Each structure stands twice: as C-alpha cells, then as structure tokens.
Image (tube, helix red, strand yellow):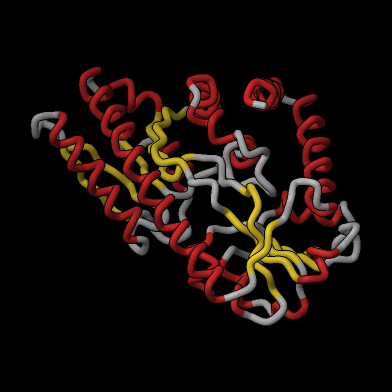
Amino acid sequence: MTLSVGLGGVFASDPVFHHHLRGFFQRVGHLSGGSLGFQPRFLPSGSSPLATAREGSLDLVISSSTYGSPLIRTFFGSLYPAISGDHQAWMRSERGFALWRELYAREGLHAIGFGTSAGLYGQLMSGKARAAEEAAGLRALVSTSERHDWLRGMGLESTLASNTRSLFAADSRKLDVLEPLQPSFIRGTKLHAQSGFHYVVGDWDKSSYNIEMLSLVKNWERLPAEIRAVLERAAAEESVLLTAALKQREQEALRRIAAESAVAEISTDHPFRREITARKELWLDRWAERDSLAATLLEARRRSSRSLA
C-alpha cells in the first residue's frame, strides 16, 4: 500500500528535520514488513498545510509548521512568552495530547504529533529593556498579530513584521525587544552579535510538536486498523530521537552564542515578563468565556501547573 503525502515546512532546508522524516518513513516500512510506503511531494511555497489536509486530496500532510487555527496557534504554538516551564510536561501527558487532537478534530482532521521542543528558546533584548522597570516605551518587533496586540496594549512601540525572517533585516539599534526564538535560528542570522543586544536566557518555550501529521478524518478512517497503528507507533518512536537531536542542536547553538556575545539571565519576576504574562492570561480568560474548548484547554493547563508546582 502506498500513501500520498504532502510535505510542508523546513524538511528541504533543515538537515535534522530531513533526517528524522526519513527515519519515520523507514520505521514505517520496517514495522509494516515492507507493505506500506509513501509517495511524497513538497507542497507549493506559501500553501497552507492545514488547508491542504482539509481538502483531502492527499492521504497525509506532514509539516514542521502548521498551527492553522487560532486555538492551536495560541495553546500549542509559539506563545509569547511560554505559558510556563511545565507546559512541556503537560504536552506529553495523555490529557494534553488528547486535547491537542481535539483541536484538530474540530477542523475535521486526525492529527499525529512527534518531536517536542527542548524548551531552549531565548530572546534578544537591549540593555535598556533588561534594566527597565516597566514595559511602556520599549521598542519591539514581532511576527504575529497576537504578540503585536499584547505589546501595544502594554505601551510598547511594537512593529508587526511580515514574517520571522524579516525580523533580522531590521536595524537592531532602533529596537529593544525581539520575540523568543531558537538559539540555532538566532545564531544563523548573527543578530546576537550586533552591538547593543543581549541574548537573554529564560524559560521561553515552544510548547508544541515539532512535526505534525494530519489526515482528513474520512481518509484516516478508510485506512486499515493495522496501518493506522503502524503510523502511530512509528511517530511515537521517532519522536524520542527527534526531541533528543533538537535538544543537542539548541544546546550547542546556545554554547556558541555565549562564546560570541553577551548572554544574560532574565527571571520570571522581570517587569517586562510579569506584565506580558498577566495581560496574556487576561486575554486567554476572555477567549475562554466565548469558547468552551478554549475554556477546557485553559483549565487543563492551569490544573497541570498547580499539580506540577
């Protein structure tokens, strides 16, 4: 049996993701005794993996960057800053995984996730931002509308970039805060080496799966039960290896950043972090009042935080 697969994200450019995607394909072949294979093709540049999966023309869509619905992007995507340091533990729990799947089921999709980030995100801040007693007046550049709205509400002079890459085309001398990003990404752009910026280490976190595999529910249910089991098991096994590889890469990138530029710590009681966390929590509460699934997610996360405290 051969499954048609659409590939989105960084598989063509990122060797770690490429390697573990191949590892997943090979693992599926082994577990199926060679009876299951794939016919992969890259999705056109700029196309939405989520929309492609919903169309149902492909058996599977595998992407390193989906987050199509607002709920998925907010509760499981790259938050500003991360909800809490224990969010990864919640993601790995049976309840967290079930709620993540429920979000995609709302989109008519069956979802499989593998690889969880190592929780090593850092942030670039100016000396002025690190010393500030309040956030108002600081200059920020971010790439998502949610972060942009939060920061403007705090009195920052926030500019919304067209995409993440454009963050690094900016004149850093005119900025105080950039959004949290992976050490490997920041080092690749060399922005950390520009005058005036400190790479700030905190408990920033991209609390989601690194690779998401989506299938229209009716397509998924047409697959034989043994094939579905093979796909689930292969993803779970490759997830462990991908997570370890990403953790090693980000730790090495952070070590190199520390050798090349000023690195500082930022605590959870920093004025900037306290204020943005409080505003985000209020924003989430208002969303939960309008949406029952958002309320379920918010309560589950807070209950997890209390139990792990």
Pick whichever, 140 or 261, lies toward us.
261
- Res 38 quadrant in image: top left
Residue 106, can we see it? no
Q: In this view, does 300 lie above or below 88?
A: above
State the quadrant of the N terminus. top left
Q: Residue furthest top?
A: 225
The residue located at (67%, 65%) in the rendering is 124
Image coordinates for residue 161, horizontal then vertical, percent: 67, 66
Q: How many labels does the image show?
A: 0
Residue 217 lies left or right of residue 223; in this view the side is right
Image coordinates for residue 156, horizontal then vertical, percent: 85, 61
The residue located at (9%, 34%) in the rendering is 34
Residue 123 lies left or right of residue 149; in this view the side is left
- Res 306 quadrant in image: top right
Pick whichever, 301 or 254, lies toward us.
254
Q: Is residue 237 above or below residue 252?
A: above
Q: Is residue 51 above or below residue 105?
A: below
The residue located at (53%, 73%) in the rendering is 259
Image coordinates for residue 83, horizontal then vertical, percent: 67, 39
Residue 2, can we see it? yes
Pick whichever, 148 or 17, lies toward us.
17
